[in-house]
Image (tube, rainbow, N blue to C red):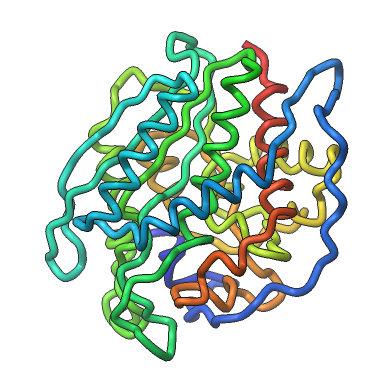
Amino acid sequence: MAQAGVSISKWILTLGCVSILASCSTPDKKAETPPELPVVKNAVQVPDFNADSSYSFIKTQVDFGPRVPNTKAHEKCAEWYITKLKMYGLTVHVQEGTVTDYENRSMKIKNIMGSFNPGSKARIILFSHWDSRRIADDDSVRKNEAIDGADDGASGCGVMLEVARQIAKLSPQIGVDVMFLDAEDTGEPHSLSIAKHPEDAWCLGTQYWTKNMPPDYHPRFGILLDMVGAKNATFPMEANSMAFASDYVKKIWQEAADIGFSNFFLYTEDGQITDDHFYINRDAKIPTVDIINYNSVTGGFGSYHHTHADNLSIIDRNTLKGVGQTLLQVIYSEKP
């Protein structure tokens, strides 16, 4: 099946041609000092996103070990998510299923959703994948061992958990869902992808969810978080997000600028990426924006991508603050 983009974990479609992503780091950018919060904008009180708390959630995930489907670390982490969400008063729904990867491996998956104010029809949803890659195919050593996935997986989940913690303390005016998507990082290594172009081998948990979601679920929009914790991260306006949900991209990036985080959220459109949001937009018809660390200068993800360097050492609290505070600003600015 032809697609407008190619797999996030492997390829980028840029200027009409497909090229293999180079492992490279983002350019140095000085992070702005996070504002003193709670933030008040247009008389809307917004909680203070605690980057230390978010970092601790990321560390807990990494401490379980690589969250690869069919492993004990995967199962223990799922139980922890469920416990935390219930602790914060969210209604939890776990969708269990079985998917098959590109090597015909059967994987038991869990998509975990926590819902605040589930009775409200006015709602938005946050997404992040929580699995980590089972191989380090872009590394030069230990290529067949699973990676920590501190940024690629755990960072988005750590931000969402801190958002949930803040929502438990100060209720927004709308309903909010947080969705932990499984089996995103399941596609083929570069060498195989060149020949087969298996875009649909990625994001298996999301594809399962979109085929089995409740028919009456219609949030206003969604926000996907992917690799949102690394130092000097930059988030351009991703091209598929602009194609499906441009109004919401502009809204989020404006909110980020208004509270001082334009150094992270760049007003440039770049990177047509097939991430979880592609299937959510196309199949679930939920306009969804991808906040993803992509280097517009070098045309790739960080040098740690799909390597063992994707560990806690690359996680930066300033980046977590910029993303998390922007999300809270968006949530608390929404009206019923």
Give percent across and percent down for residue 112: 34, 36
Image: 90 above or below 74: above
Residue in front for this viewpoint, 299 or 87: 87
Q: In which quarter of the image is the C terminus?
A: top right
Q: Residue furthest bottom?
A: 140
Residue 324 location in percent, x, y?
Answer: 66, 41
Left or right: where does residue 223 sit relative to residue 252?
A: left
Vertically, is 122 above or below 134?
above
Q: How many marks?
A: 0
Of residues 248 and 184, the one nearer the viewer is: 184
Residue shown at the point (38%, 46%) measured from the top left: 279
Identify the residue at horizontal 65%, vertical 17% (top origin).
170
Q: In this view, does 142 lie to the left or right of 59?
A: left
Give coordinates of residue 274: x percent, y percent. Answer: 44, 58
Judging depth in this view, the residue of 56 and 35 nearest the camera is 56
Q: Can residue 8 be seen in this view?
A: yes
Q: Which residue is drawn at 55% across and 58% down?
A: 227
Quadrant in which residue 138 is drawn: bottom left
In the rendered image of this protein, does residue 6 appear above or below residue 96? below
In which quarter of the view is residue 335 placed? top right
Q: Can residue 243 be seen in this view?
A: no
Residue at 24% across, 56% down? 69
Residue 72 lies, in percent from the top left, at 23, 55
| The N terminus lies in quadrant | bottom left
